[in-house]
Image: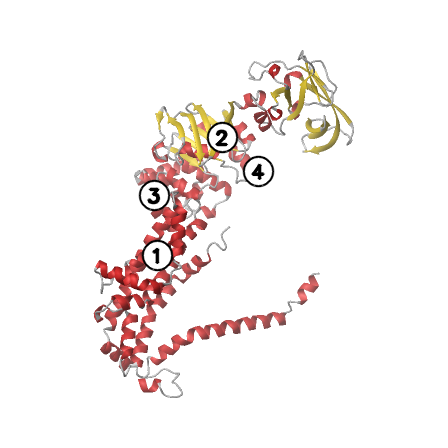
Amino acid sequence: MASLQLSNLSKSFNQTKVLEGLNLMVPEGEFIALIGPSGCGKSTLLRIIAGLDEPTSGDVLLDGQWVNELSPRERKVAMVFQSYALYPHMTVFENIGFNLKISKIPRQEIRQRVTQTAAILDLEELLERKPSQLSGGQRQRVAMGRAIVRNPNLFLFDEPLSNLDAKLRVQMRDEIKKLHKAIKTTSIYVTHDQVEAMTLADRIVILNDGVIQQIGTPQQLYNTPVNPFVAGFIGSPSMNFLNGKWEDDHKTAIILKDGTKLPAPVPKSNTHFDASTQNDILIGMRPEHLHLRPAMSEDIQVKGVLDHIEPTGAQNYLKVRVDGQIITATDLQQSQLQSQQPIELAIAHKNLHFFANTAHE
Amino acid sequence: MQNVKRSAHTPKTQTLARLAKLNFLAFGIVITIFPFVWVALMGTHTRSEIFSSPPPFYIGDNFIDNYYKLLEIMPFWLVLWNSLFISVMGTIGAVFFCSLCAYGFFAFEFRGKNIIFTLMIASMMVPPALLLIPFFLTVQFLGILDTHFALWFPAIANAFGIFLVRQYMVTAISKDLLDAAKVDGASHLRIFLVIVLPLIKPVLATLGIVMFIGLWNNFLSPLIVLSSPDKFVLTLALRSVQSLGDSPWGAVMLGTFLSMLPLLIAFLFFSKQIMAGLTAGAVKG
């Protein structure tokens, strides 16, 4: 086990900057999820940590030791690939034991450790099979086995579940969580699936365009996103945004395009946003915080017209036209509503998020 | 809709189509095989029988005499060994070094990689006849005229082989596999030997057989390099006895037939791999 520190890490391919000035400290034993949209640089970052790519500038430290120039083997990292990358011509046993064999570990010990690992992952019956004779979930487990058999300093996962079907993904997610609880190896987990990140990680790092947007626990990211990108990325369905301006110079209320008035934001202790310095303001509301009921005290009223309903079984998502755009509200009661019917939604003042509307600057 | 479709494929038309296809294939087989059978048959006849009219299209009884005649006009088994030696050395060398070089083009990123690769491909377009004189001058300069080394050594690095193997690697091996092996702690040499080589067996068999046939049938380079009769290869030896006024055609044909056997055996051995190699990429997703 080891701690990982990235300091001022940057990577460019020719003229294209992929990562820019990254700083991250991962204490020993922590499970970190790296998420962001495709092409945000998360896989590149993982490859740099693994030692498969070199950073253009900046340092990678493992347990306080500078490892920029060490090979993956010298770093003692293990990686699970999105494509599993099992050696097709080797049996499951040989796949799991390959790195032990390279490390010249005695045959007896290899046998013992591979069998032990296989027992943890429920692979004992499959040791003599070739990867082509395994199902997707089994291959995934072999890939995990190959990583844990060597007791690495650091576990790296590169979207390991994205090739599995939805049911298996949930199952494997639980297994990874259990595994981490049992062996407690420092782990970096790359995914584009925010549910995976939220359920697995101690802390989440959100990347966009090669820049870290926010680092925090799943709760922190959900409750106090620092910018519209994080706010929109975390939570499903994603946050609704409405454009607003100050009503007048006194800055006591924000007014939407259609004339709806919202009281000025209550400064939250842990947001970095000072609304009073901005002219254009983005107001964020999570669908699950918008309720289909008249406003009570502490509530804000949002009026609109129902466009259509998206039923999901457990709840309905109401698509409501407000201020010239469609916003989503979660309706747990699954009320009987008609399309084009006027709707009154209520949201608690404390659940409103305010951001600078940089798109208008 | 279904009825209309079905009427176009009645059992009768199906049988006819099958029959036509079989006839076509049979015709192709006969055309391809005839010269070989003809050579084999002529190896059992005397010279006068071969030139009689109509030509004898049956097994004759002069096989033993032709064999002794063959040994008389050339050291047949020595010459066969020479051919075998050159072909085997060149084939093993080419398979190993071409795949090694192809791995370089496949696994490494370096400045000028594409330019070098393109130049290499372009070199395949130079007609071989144009290279004969430079080849002779180089061999002469190196002082390896009249050696077998001059015949198999230059063959072990060739653009075709490198190109063929690299293209196969691109379709058959994912880069993740190389990365996984690196994370597992394997060096590049080990990755090449333990991971890559086993996965490209089909294309190695293809390259092997192509190289073997090429070296076995090679006539021009031995002609300009070799001068001592005891170093001759089959093609050269068989050609050299034909210049006699009274060529012993029966013996020459027997020698020609015997010289085809090693190729036939090699092909039977590797045909499965060769087919797999030539069609690879076509079925891979």
Residues packed near mark 2 inside 10 Å, few (<14), some (14 to 19) or many (20 plus): many
Say which residue appears at 38% left-offset and 37% top-offset.
B183
User: Mark 4 vs mark 3: same chain?
Assistant: no
Subunit of label 1: B
Relative to A312, residue B201 above or below: below
Residue A210 locus on image (x, y percent): 49, 30
Mark found first going from the N terminus, 4 or 2: 4
* Picture disc at residue A166: 4
| For the residues bearing labels 4 and 3, Cβ distance under 8 angstroms | no
Q: Residue B92: name its quadrant.
A: bottom left
Q: Residue at x 31, y 73 (%)?
A: B258
Q: Nearer the viewer, residue A1 or A226?
A: A226
Q: Which residue is mark 1?
A: B158
Label 3: element kind:
helix
Does residue A356 lie above or below B182 as drawn? above
Does label 1 or label 3 sit earlier along the sequence? 1
Front label number (1 vs 3): 1
Tag 2: amino acid: Gly
- The crowding category of the residue bearing disc 3, from other C-alpha atoms within 10 Å (few below 14, some 14 to 19, many at least 20), is some
Q: Which residue is mark 2?
A: A210
Q: What residue sits right under mark 3 in the picture?
A: B188
B98 relative to A230, above or below: below
Residue A212 picture location, percent across and down: 50, 26
Q: CA distance from mark 1 to mark 3?
A: 22 Å
Discs 3 and 2 share one subunit: no
